[in-house]
Image (cartoon, rainbow, N blue to C red):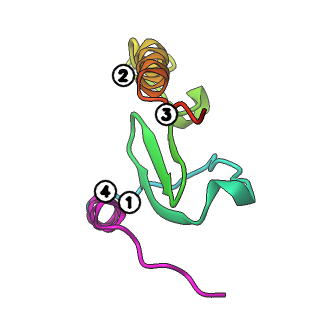
Amino acid sequence: MSSSPLSQYLQHLKQWAESYQSRIPLQDKFPPRLNPEDGTLVATLISPQISYYFTTKVFIKRQPHRDELGLDINGDPLLIPYIADRLRIEAAALQIGREANAVDSQ
């Protein structure tokens, strides 16, 4: 199976993710289930607030599960405010961008 070389953009993302993970290595307890049509996984970046997954065809951004976040100094479950809202707004913005830039095939 021959693989095509990665674009300059994907190469940069891969280097960025590897650099980040080498400095702040975090375990990925809930990786996404990728389908074959999603392409090959190129890079994974796990941060305390957001996880990023880059494939040759798909970009996935997910927030951590509550049990991944741990507890705050008072022993309560740690919450990152507005993270779900941010992800919804970003998804809506991407949808608007996709619709605005759609190429009519007729």
Location of residue 15 in the rendering, given as x and y in whole percent from the top left corner: 29, 67
What are the residue bounds of the magenta stretch? Answer: 1-22
Q: CA distance from mark 3 to mark 4?
A: 41 Å
Which of the marked residues, 1 or 2, is nearer the chain's N terminus?
Answer: 1
- Residue 15 part of the magenta segment: yes
Taking 75 as reference, is 29 above or below it?
A: below
Query: Closer to the camera: disc 4 or disc 2?
Result: 4
Which of the marked residues, 3 or 4, is nearer the chain's N terminus?
Answer: 4
Query: Closer to the camera: disc 3 or disc 2?
Result: 3
Taking 13 as reference, is 98 above or below it?
A: above
Location of residue 61 in the rendering, given as x and y in whole percent from the top left corner: 48, 38
**In the rendered structure, which amino acid carries the disc numbered 1?**
Pro
Query: Closer to the camera: disc 3 or disc 4?
Result: 3
Q: Is residue 42 visible?
A: yes
The secondary element bearing badge 3 is classed as loop
**In the rendered structure, which amino acid carries the disc numbered 3?**
Val
Q: Main secondary structure of the magenta part?
A: helix
Location of residue 21 in the rendering, given as x and y in whole percent from the top left corner: 34, 61
The tag on residue 73 is: 2
Q: Is residue 79 visible?
A: no
Residue identifier under label 4: 24
Residue identifier under label 3: 103
Residue identifier under label 1: 25
Q: Could you tell me which quadrant the C terminus lies in? A: top right
Q: Judge from the rendering whether residue 24 lies leftward or rightward of residue 85; answer left or right.
A: left
Query: Closer to the camera: disc 1 or disc 2?
Result: 1
Between 15 and 95, the residue placed more toward the observer is 95
Between 13 and 21, the residue placed more toward the observer is 13
> Given the current orientation, which residue lies at the most extreme front position?
106
Residue at 26% x, 65% y: name it.
Answer: 19
Decide: few, some or many residues near mark 3? Use Cα within 10 Å; few <14, some 14-19, many ≥20.
Answer: few
Residue contact at pointers 3 and 4, CB within 8 angstroms: no
